[in-house]
Image (cartoon, rainbow, N blue to C red):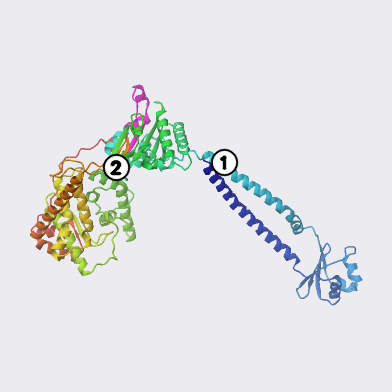
C-alpha cells in the first residue's frame, strides 16, 4: 500500500510540475511582450535641446509633441527624434535661451499631451503587479489540482455502471427486436411479469429468482436479451462489464459492488446486468485467473449483496457468460443465480427472422430471398448475421447501387465465412488446374457419399487463406451427428488430396488444412465420442480437468499402450476414408475431368450449375428430405 501511495503522490507531483512549466512559459511570454513595448518607446535616439533649437532655426522641424519633460520631434523629412527640456523652465523659454527667434518658434506647432495615459500607467504598474498575479495564479492552480485529486480519490470506489432510462425510446429494446431464442424469452417473461406487477407473486408467497444468468456462445444475443427484459418491463437498466469492478487498488471492486446495489435499490424496480461475469466470478482458490485477491474480494461482495436482498426489493440481477464451467459454485446456488438460461445458435427459421430485423431499414431488391440466405448460414450467430447484412450494404454502396440484391447477400455469406476475395492472387495455369481438380475432388466425393452434405458452390477464386473452396451445407440444421456422417466428412476432406495424387501423381501443400481437419475429427471420434470399434465407449481425451470443489486436477489416466491403440485407430479411420475417396474418384474419373474443365473456364460453379453437370455425367444430385411439421411458439413469446 505504501508503494501505491508513493506512486499516487509521484503522479500528483508530475502533474503539478507540468502545470508549473506551463505557468513559467506564460510568464516568459508576457515578459517578452512587455520588453518589446518598452524597447519600442526607447528605440528613438535622444538628442540635446540645443540641437533641437538649431533644427528649428534651420526650418527642419515639422512639429513638436510635448509630454511632461519629453519632446517628440517630427522632422520635415518624416524622421522622429526625442529630447528633454529643462524641468524648471517652459519649452519656449528654453528654446529662446538657445537662440531660437520668436518668429521661428511660431512657425513650429507644439502639441502638449498628458503624461498620465494608459501606456504610462501600464508601464509603471505592470512590473509590480505581474509577480503578484503570478504567485496568486500558481497557488490557485495547486489548490485546484489538489482538490481534483481528492475528489478522484473519493469517487474511485463509485460504480461505473451505465444507466439506461426506461423513458428513453431511442435506446429502448423489446422482445420484438430480438428474433429467435423463443425458449429463453418464454423463461424471461416471468421476470418481466414480476417487475411489472410483483404484488401477485408476493401475495401467493412466490419468490421470483434474484439472479438470472444467460449462457451462450459469443454473438448469440445475451446483452440484447437482457436489455429487452428491461424494455418490456419499462424499468431502469444498469449495464457494466465484469472487468470494470477490478482495479489495481485493493477494495475498489467491493466498494463499486456496494455502490452499484445501492444505486439499483434507489431506482427499484430495476435490473442490474453484468456482462462477462466470469472475469470476476471464477472459482476461488483454483488457480484460474491468477488467484487475484482483489477479484475474489469483489466476488465475495457480490455474493453478500445478493444474499442481502429482501423479497420486496424488486431488484433483478442478470449476468452473461460463455464460460459457465469456470464459475464459482457459490454464484450458482439457489438464492443467487439460481436460474440458468441457455442461448443456442439460431436455427434456420430463427436466422430468417434475425435477417429480417437487420434488413428492416435497408433497401432490398425484388430478388432478395432471406430464406435462401438463412439456409446458407448454418452455425451463424446473431452477430454474424448482423455483420452479413452490413457487409451486403457496403458491397452495394461501393458499386453505387441504391438497393441490396440477392447476389450481394450471397457474396457477404462467403466473405464472413472465408474472408474477402483476393483478386490480386493470380494463379499460374498449372496451379489453377491443380486447384480446380482439388476442389472438384471434394465436391464429387461429397455428392456421391450418402451421409455427406450437398454442395452449394465450388470456386477457384482465392478467399482469405484458401486458393479455392467448396461450400457444402446441410439441408437442415442438426443437433446430433452420427458416426457415418463423421466418416463421410473425413472422406470428403481427403477428396482433394486423393485427386491430386491420382491425377498429377504428386501432392501439394494445398491439402495440409484438409488433412489437419480430418485427423482432428478422427481423433475426436476415438477419444471423445467413443466411436471406435476397438476401444469402445471410453472417454480418452482429458488429461486434466477442473473440479469445482477441488480446483484444477492433473491426471494421467491413459497408459502408453492405450496411446498406441488410439494412434492405430486414428490411422485406420484415415486410411479407410482415403480408400473410399479413391474408389469414388477412380469410378467417376470422366465426371471429374469434365467438372474440372468446366470449373477452370467458369472459375465458380453455383449449386444449380453444378447439379446440371452432375446429371449430364450420369450422377443423381442429392434431394432435400421431406420437412417435418414445425411447432410455433405463442405470439407473446415471439413479441408479436
Residue at point 20% right, 49% down? 521
Q: Residue 443, located in which quarter of the rendered image?
A: bottom left
| Extent of the magenta region | 190-216
Q: CA distance from mark 1 to mark 2?
A: 48 Å
Residue at horizontal 23%, vertical 41%?
557
Residue 467 makes an appearance in the image: yes
User: Viewer-nearest of labels 1 and 2?
Assistant: 1
Which residue is most to the right?
A: 97
Which residue is the site of mark 1? 150
Q: Give me the disc on residue 179.
A: 2
Q: Is residue 55 left or right of residue 556?
A: right
Q: Is residue 45 above or below residue 348?
A: below
Q: Are discs 1 and 2 less than 8 Å apart at CB? A: no
Task: Estimate the x, y position of residue 478 in percent, counting from the top left.
Answer: 19, 44
Give the residue at the far bottom of this rendering.
58
Q: Identify which residue, 368 or 85, lies in the foreground.
A: 85
Answer with the quarter of the image where residue 305 lies.
top left
Q: Characterize the local packing of mark 1: few (<14), some (14-19) or many (20 or more) Cα atoms within 10 angstroms.
A: few
Amino acid at each position: 500500500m505504501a508503494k501505491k501511495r508513493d506512486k499516487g503522490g509521484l503522479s500528483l507531483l508530475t502533474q503539478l510540475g507540468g502545470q508549473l512549466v506551463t505557468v513559467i512559459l506564460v510568464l516568459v511570454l508576457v515578459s517578452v511582450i512587455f520588453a518589446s513595448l518598452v524597447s519600442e518607446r526607447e528605440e528613438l535616439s535622444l538628442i540635446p535641446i540645443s540641437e533641437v533649437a538649431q533644427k528649428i532655426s534651420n526650418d527642419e522641424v515639422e512639429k513638436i509633441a510635448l509630454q511632461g519633460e519629453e519632446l517628440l520631434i517630427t522632422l520635415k523629412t518624416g524622421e522622429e527624434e526625442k529630447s528633454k527640456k529643462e524641468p524648471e523652465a517652459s519649452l519656449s523659454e528654453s528654446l529662446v535661451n538657445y537662440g531660437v527667434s520668436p518668429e521661428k518658434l511660431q512657425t513650429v506647432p507644439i502639441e502638449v499631451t498628458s503624461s498620465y495615459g494608459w501606456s504610462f500607467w501600464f508601464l509603471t504598474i505592470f512590473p509590480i503587479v505581474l509577480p503578484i498575479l503570478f504567485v496568486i495564479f500558481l497557488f490557485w492552480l495547486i489548490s485546484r489540482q489538489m482538490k481534483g485529486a481528492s475528489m478522484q480519490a473519493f469517487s474511485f470506489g463509485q460504480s461505473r455502471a451505465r444507466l439506461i432510462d426506461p423513458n428513453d425510446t431511442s435506446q429502448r429494446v423489446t422482445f420484438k427486436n430480438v428474433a429467435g431464442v423463443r425458449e429463453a424469452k418464454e423463461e424471461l417473461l416471468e421476470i418481466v411479469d414480476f417487475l411489472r406487477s410483483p404484488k401477485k407473486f408476493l401475495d401467493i408467497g412466490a419468490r421470483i429468482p434474484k439472479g438470472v444468468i444467460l449462457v451462450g456462445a459469443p454473438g448469440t444475443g445475451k446483452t440484447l436479451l437482457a436489455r429487452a427484459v428491461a424494455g418490456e418491463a419499462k424499468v431502469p437498466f444498469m449495464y457494466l462489464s465484469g472487468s470494470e469492478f477490478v482495479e489495481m487498488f485493493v477494495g475498489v471492486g467491493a466498494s463499486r459492488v456496494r455502490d452499484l446495489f445501492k444505486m439499483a435499490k434507489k431506482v427499484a424496480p430495476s435490473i442490474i446486468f453484468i456482462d462477462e461475469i466470469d472475469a470476476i466470478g471464477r472459482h476461488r482458490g483454483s488457480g484460474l485467473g491468477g488467484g487475484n485477491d482483489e477479484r475474489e474480494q469483489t466476488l465475495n461482495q457480490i455474493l453478500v449483496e445478493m444474499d442481502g436482498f429482501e423479497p420486496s426489493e424488486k431488484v433483478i440481477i442478470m449476468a452473461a457468460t460463455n464460460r459457465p464451467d469456470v464459475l464459482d459454485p457459490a454464484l450458482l446456488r439457489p438464492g443467487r443465480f439460481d436460474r440458468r438460461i441457455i442461448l443456442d445458435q439460431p436455427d434456420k427459421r430463427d436466422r430468417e427472422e434475425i435477417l429480417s430485423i437487420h434488413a428492416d431499414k435497408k433497401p432490398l431488391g425484388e430478388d432478395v430471398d432471406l430464406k435462401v440466405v438463412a439456409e446458407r448460414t448454418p452455425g451463424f450467430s446473431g452477430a454474424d448475421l448482423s455483420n452479413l447484412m452490413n457487409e451486403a450494404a457496403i458491397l452495394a454502396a461501393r458499386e453505387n447501387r441504391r438497393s441490396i440484391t440477392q447476389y450481394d447477400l450471397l457474396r457477404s455469406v462467403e466473405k464472413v465465412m472465408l474472408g474477402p476475395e483476393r483478386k490480386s492472387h493470380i494463379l499460374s495455369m498449372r496451379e489453377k488446374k491443380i486447384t480446380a481438380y482439388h476442389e472438384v475432388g471434394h465436391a464429387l466425393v461429397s455428392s456421391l457419399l450418402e451421409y455427406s452434405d450437398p454442395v452449394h458452390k465450388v470456386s477457384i477464386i482465392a478467399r482469405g487463406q484458401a486458393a479455392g473452396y467448396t461450400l457444402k451445407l446441410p439441408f437442415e440444421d442438426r443437433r446430433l451427428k452420427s458416426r457415418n456422417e463423421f466418416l463421410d466428412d473425413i472422406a470428403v476432406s481427403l477428396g482433394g488430396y486423393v485427386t491430386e495424387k491420382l491425377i498429377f501423381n504428386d501432392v501439394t501443400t494445398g491439402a495440409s488444412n484438409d488433412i489437419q481437419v480430418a485427423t482432428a475429427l478422427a481423433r475426436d471420434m476415438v477419444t471423445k465420442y467413443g466411436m471406435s470399434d476397438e476401444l469402445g465407449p471410453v472417454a480418452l481425451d482429458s488429461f486434466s480437468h477442473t473440479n469445482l470443489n477441488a480446483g484444477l486436477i492433473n491426471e494421467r489416466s491413459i497408459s502408453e499402450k492405450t496411446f498406441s491403440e488410439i494412434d492405430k485407430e486414428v490411422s485406420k479411420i484415415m486410411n479407410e476414408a482415403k480408400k473410399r475417396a479413391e474408389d469414388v474418384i477412380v469410378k467417376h474419373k470422366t465426371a471429374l475431368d469434365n467438372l474440372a474443365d468446366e470449373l477452370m473456364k467458369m472459375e465458380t460453379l453455383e449449386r444449380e450449375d453444378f447439379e446440371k453437370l452432375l446429371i449430364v455425367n450420369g450422377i443423381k444430385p442429392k434431394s432435400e428430405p421431406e420437412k417435418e411439421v414445425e411447432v410455433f411458439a405463442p405470439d407473446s413469446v415471439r413479441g408479436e
